[in-house]
Image (cartoon, rainbow, N blue to C red):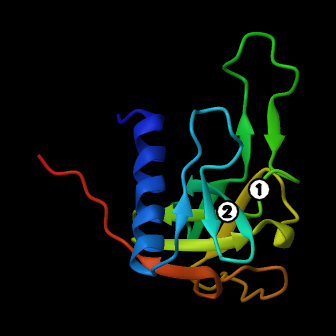
Amino acid sequence: MEHPVAVGERSQLAVMLAFAAADLPFLVPHGENTRYDLVLDLGDRFVRIQCKTGRLRAGAIRFAACSTYAHHPNPRTQRRDYAGQVDCFAVYCPETAGVYLIPLDEFTNRACGMLRVAPTRNNQRRRIRLADDYHFADVSVEITG
């Protein structure tokens, strides 16, 4: 099983490749203790990006929309959302090879996020986020050998 840090680093790399291919300048913060992974430089403003790995499950790309601290001794809180600390999630899904940009202000669920790639079984449309609406780029980041 691959270490979660390696998985996250590959997702961050995929997002960086997508931004570079789109000629979008970005900044990488120094150190591991920032709540965001990248900062997009849009010329007139900065956008704080939190990179996440999405997993394709039951017709939807699912990703964690919070940080967990259960592995720390005596954590004050088990989970911490990103409200006020990031502007956007950039989700890389290896199964679709897609990078998806989701503004944080569109988020109502602070624990996990979901983007539908296939219709729901009951054809529900309300409160459903379609992956195509947030698709930014396709990037293939594979490990060989």
How many numbered marks appear? Answer: 2
66, 87: nearer the viewer: 87
Residue 66 in view of the camera: yes
Mark sitting on residue 86: 1
Asked where in the image residue 106 lies, by quadrant, the reply is bottom right
Given the image, on which type of amino acid does mark 2 rest? Phe
Residue 141, given in percent of the width and then of the height, sits at 31, 61
120, 38: nearer the viewer: 38
49, 138: nearer the viewer: 49
Q: Secondary structure at mark 1?
A: loop
Side (left or right) of 79 relative to 133: right
13, 29: nearer the viewer: 29
Kindly indicate whether the residue at mark 1 contacts the one at mark 2 (C-beta within 8 angstroms): yes
Q: Secondary structure at mark 2?
A: strand
Given the image, on which type of amino acid does mark 1 rest? Val
Residue 34, given in percent of the width and then of the height, sits at 68, 39
Mark sitting on residue 96: none
Q: For the residues carrying marks 2 and 1, which lies nearer the camera in this image?
A: 1
Residue 59 in view of the camera: no
Side (left or right) of 18 relative to 108: left
Asked where in the image residue 35 lies, by quadrant, the reply is top right
Above or below, comparing residue 91 to residue 130 in the picture: above
- Within 10 Å of the Cα at label 1, are there few (<14), some (14-19), or many (20+) other Cα atoms? many
Mark sitting on residue 89: 2
Picture residue at 26% right of the left edge, 58% below the top: 142
Quarter the N terminus occupies: top left
Residue 64, given in percent of the width and then of the height, sits at 67, 50
